[in-house]
Amino acid sequence: MNYRQLEAFRTVMITGSTVRAAELMRVTQPAVSRNISELEASLGFSLFDRVHGRLAPTPEGQLFFREVDVSFRGLDHLRSAAAGIRDYGSGALRVASLAAMGASLVPEAIARFLGKNDKIRITLQVASSSTVRNLVAEGGFDIGLAADEVDLSGVDGQYFGGFPAVFVMPQGHPLGALDVIRPEDLKGECLIGLAPEDRARHRIDAVLSDHGVTPNYVVETPGSATICALALAGAGVGFVNPLTVQGYAERGLVIKPFLPATDFRSYLLFRPDVQKSTLVRGFIAALFDARTNAAGSAFAPDGRGDH
């Protein structure tokens, strides 16, 4: 039993004719018949009954076809995977991202990437920066995006960009009358703050301290999107990553720039023991394109870390 014999059998089963099978296989009709006869001899049972010059599958032939068809579908999958590896380095890509980018910039990058590589399968996991780091370090994910407080041991880190913090508040808040929010405007304000370990918060607190302002945090939370929701509900005002504000202005959230500019910084993470495939390099390019596109918004990244 060999591949050519199995191919001849499967093609006859699908087309119902040795003549049509020969056309598809680009061989002669006698060659197809010979392959089937040799296959029957090796199997020890008949695959077809010969009735008035036509082939009718036997019950054994029908059962055997099911197994052969499953195997050929597996081969088709292998051919597709091989084509993906040849063209892109892999047929699948696994990306992990912190929430701030997983809801905006990364989806845009995925859409850009799939526009050029529509046969690639992508998995996107949105998690905390520490979880993103672990997913990449453990080898389950190809690319990670994390905030700069993440532990870079066990991974390769590449600076991705700095995104200047914006200030959010509910409609009707007195600070909404200002074009730009400055540290001195925040004396006595009830602030919604990021988690104490967040490095963007450290930078914000340092700027406030430099201007003689002691922040009054009434709520603390790890995510900028949660700060937006809390501010929208009237629980206070706060600093957020500008990538998280999409859609909130339409719901009534007031968004203002803050000076002096204070960044939310992020890194790309990779496994240190694996060379970047063509697929990974292509997706990195899409991420930087999406970051550049963010420069057209009111609150843009600083543009550092070009690849």
Image (tube, rainbow, N blue to C red):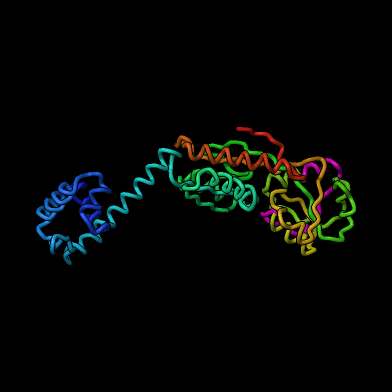
Farthest residue, direction bottom: 59
Total tally of numbered discs in the picture: 0
- Residue 226 lies, with reference to residue 108, above or below; the image says below
Between residue 249 and residue 55, name the one nearer to us: 55
| Res 282 seen here | yes
The image shows residue 28 at horizontal and vertical percentages of 19, 45
Report the side of 188 relative to 35 (left or right).
right
The image shows residue 294 at horizontal and vertical percentages of 69, 43
Question: Residue 267 is drawn in which quadrant?
Answer: top right
Picture residue at 53% right of the left edge, 43% below the top? 116
The image shows residue 240 at horizontal and vertical percentages of 73, 51
Between residue 95 and residue 211, name the one nearer to us: 95
Picture residue at 53% right of the left edge, 38% below the top? 282
Report the side of 108 relative to 27 (left or right).
right
What residue range appears in magenta? 205-224
- Residue 250 lies, with reference to residue 82, above or below; the image says below
Q: Is-magenta flag for residue 218?
A: yes
Picture residue at 21% right of the left edge, 64% below the top? 62
Q: On the rendered image, what quadrant is the C terminus found in?
A: top right
| Res 154 seen here | no
The image shows residue 197 at horizontal and vertical percentages of 67, 48
Between residue 183 and residue 3, name the one nearer to us: 3
Report the side of 99 relative to 281 (left or right).
right
Q: Is-magenta flag for residue 12?
A: no
Between residue 206 and residue 116, name the one nearer to us: 116
Picture residue at 78% right of the left edge, 63% below the top? 235
